[in-house]
Amino acid sequence: MVVETKKKVLRFGIAGLGIASTQIIPEFEGRSHLSLTAAADIRKEGRDKFAREFGGETYESIAEMCKSPNVDAIYVCSPNHLHAEHVVAVAENGKHAIVEKPMGLNLEECEAMNAAAERNGTKLLCGHTHSFDPPVRKMRQIVASGELGKLGMINTWDFNEFMYRPRMPHELDVKVGGNVVFNQGPHQLDIVRLIGGGMVRSVRAMTGIWDKSRRSEGAWSAYVEFEDGTPATCVYNGYGHFDVAEFTGWMGESPRNPDYNLRVRRALSQVSKPEEEWALKEAQRFGGGDERSRQVEGDRPQAHFGLTIVSCEHGDVRQSLHGLYIYGDEAKWEVPVADGERGRAAELEELYSAVMEDRPVFHGGRWGEATLEVVLGIMQSARERKEVYMSHQVPSPE
């Protein structure tokens, strides 16, 4: 007779009930080993809805939630400029943490977060990035195995409508991490760093602010060089004209049609006052009444973050809808990739396993700091028009 051992439960709090929380909270469903026991937010409507739906504790202050004896770990998805303050508070109260990208606004904040976690013996996982997606990990596995020969270069491009989604003022303020480099750069750079081995030598980049009504960087083009000489190009355009889904067939977690970006741009053009845009954003938060569903009907393809092509001596690799295409010396073939945990679900499971097995986390605090260093390098290079060298890089986790 086989006796099943009941898994220990890791109890989570949510720091911030914004849009990110509406994508995190559904991932707890069906995971009996993860319990959502608390939430903190300054918005009463968000706290009230959380209490009704989950019966958990609610707090106006994240610092107060950190003191709860009914919380073991906290998912920090507060605004970018508060990440460091909140992660340090989490660690100082002996809790584990997942922090949304970007990890912080500067390397000093990252150092403080890492020091707090290391001093208190807590786990710190840096997400949410698409390097957790199974196809990206499979690309790294192929490169590391050498089955296609030596890695030659990595090229990745993403074109979407990011700049025309409803925004609050701080989301378009670069002083508090409000631009696409801070918000979307960690996705792209984590993918490139993971596949390329992690150790970036330098970056040369330019950014673009092309819409006078939204004075924040909405595009970049970067040349990234690894310590071993491998080059990578990273291109991102969030201005909503061309959509790279025309090449991939899939973008994010919702299929695009040719008019999608145009509709998004037109919808925002109908908003005449900043307050009207803020209201649209507020409605999408947890408890706001217009939360976007993360569910996709039918056969769900793998998650994509633009188009990434990995070139090796004996073949090129890119994602397909359900795996990877390999273009070899003599043939093209597809490698199926099991649709395992992705995104925030993968992060929750990774932290759980790391805590229960007492091992380092995949994409820990030092990895997150290294990725932010490249993000900051893009901004500095564009500002000073020069190559910027890295000094806080760490190898890819294997």
Image (cartoon, rainbow, N blue to C red):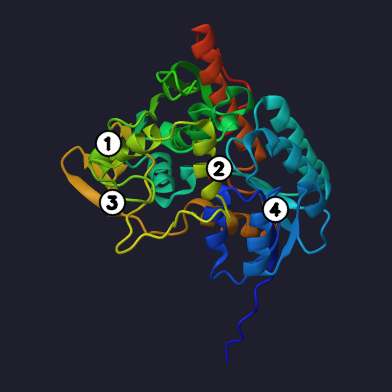
Q: Is residue 132 visible?
A: yes
In this figure, which residue is indicated by the disc labeled 4? 74
In this figure, which residue is indicated by the disc labeled 3? 321
Instruction: Indicate which disc, 3 or 2, sits on the residue closer to the N terminus.
Output: 3
Drawn side of residue 70 relative to residue 362, left or right: right
Instruction: Indicate which disc, 4 or 2, sits on the residue closer to the N terminus.
Output: 4
Instruction: Indicate which disc, 1 or 4, sits on the residue closer to the N terminus.
Output: 4
- Which is closer to the viewer, label 1 or label 3? 3
Cα–Cα gap, marks 4 and 2: 23 Å
Q: Amino acid at mark 4?
A: Ile
- Which is closer to the viewer, label 1 or label 4? 4
- Which is closer to the viewer, label 4 or label 2? 4
**Which mark is on residue 397?**
2
**Which mark is on residue 202?**
none
Q: Position of residue 198 (x, y in %)?
A: 52, 32
Instruction: Indicate which disc, 1 or 2, sits on the residue closer to the N terminus.
Output: 1
- Give the camera-side residue of 68 and 326: 68
Q: Single out the residue that lies furthest toward the top.
A: 385
Drawn side of residue 129 relative to residue 368, left or right: left
Q: Is residue 356 visible?
A: no
Q: Are marks 1 and 3 in contact (CB under 8 Å)?
A: no
Identify the element where label 1 is drawn: strand
Q: Amino acid at mark 1?
A: Asp
Residue at the spot x=83%, y=54% of the render? Answer: 67
In this figure, which residue is indicated by the disc labeled 1? 316
